Image: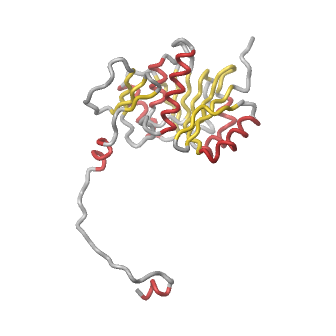
Amino acid sequence: AAFLEAAGLETDFAVACEPYRERDWQEAFRQGFEPVAVGGRLVVAPSWWEGPLPEAATVLRIDPQMAFGTGHHPTTRACLAWLVARAEAAAGRPGSLLDAGCGSGVLAIAGHRLGFAPVTAVDSDPVACATARRNAAANGAAVAVVEGDLARASLAPAATVVANLTAGAILALLPRLLAWVAPGGRLLLAGILAEREREVAQAVAAAGGRPRRYAEEAGWVALECVSPRERPE
């Protein structure tokens, strides 16, 4: 009490103790992870789900482990819906796909199931890469998972690039992200808080990327960007 008084802190409070009850946090997480439908075509379901699923949907079985990407976050849903739209616009032959910062691999796996090929996924986190490889194998998806620093990774340009990161990471990696977009291709930047949308959009425009807002949900924004390089004649 003397220490609290000397620090100018309140001393008039009560302390209560109660037994700690063990809890299976992994099981608690699993109970809260249910299938989610995205883009009118995809359903992301946990690998352990035993309940009913829509028969006509393309089902992705994902076990995220410690990696990001279950389909429930607004940024992941926006990316999945964008991939569906890209695939449909290309009549099921959308070309190559690069998932920059792949996490659980859900976007790359969705890309494979939607007809993108070849599909490459890159992440600097070895746990995320291992998780993405397991999920790709479980879904029969041909995805080349590359473990490496995105700031140094040497990757071939792709017709479609998706980067579900953060505004700070996007700004730091922007020259590389744009360089990975093949001439005439498209890039989706997601994981951007609404208050930083203008900052990111201005940086993309300054680099010649022609950004436009693709989606906004719950304070999260996704920007679609056109390749700064024109398609060869």
- Taking 102 as reference, is 203 left or right? right
Frontmost residue, 4 versus 131: 4
**What quarter of the picture does the C terminus occupy?**
top right
- Determine if residue 161 is in view: yes
Residue at the image point whose x is 67% and y is 32% from the top: 212
Among the 4 quarters of the image, the one containing residue 151: top right
- Determine if residue 130 is in view: no
- Taking 65 as reference, is 202 left or right? right
**What quarter of the picture does the N terminus occupy?**
bottom left
Measuring from the top left, give residue 10's x and y in whole percent: 45, 81
Measuring from the top left, give residue 131's x and y in whole percent: 41, 35
- Taking 12 as reference, is 50 left or right? left
Measuring from the top left, give residue 231's x and y in whole percent: 71, 17
Q: Height in image: 8 above or below 117?
A: below
Measuring from the top left, give residue 62's x and y in whole percent: 37, 32
Frontmost residue, 1 versus 129: 1
Residue at the image point whose x is 75% and y is 34% from the top: 207
Type of colouring: secondary structure
- Taking 197 as reference, is 13 left or right? left
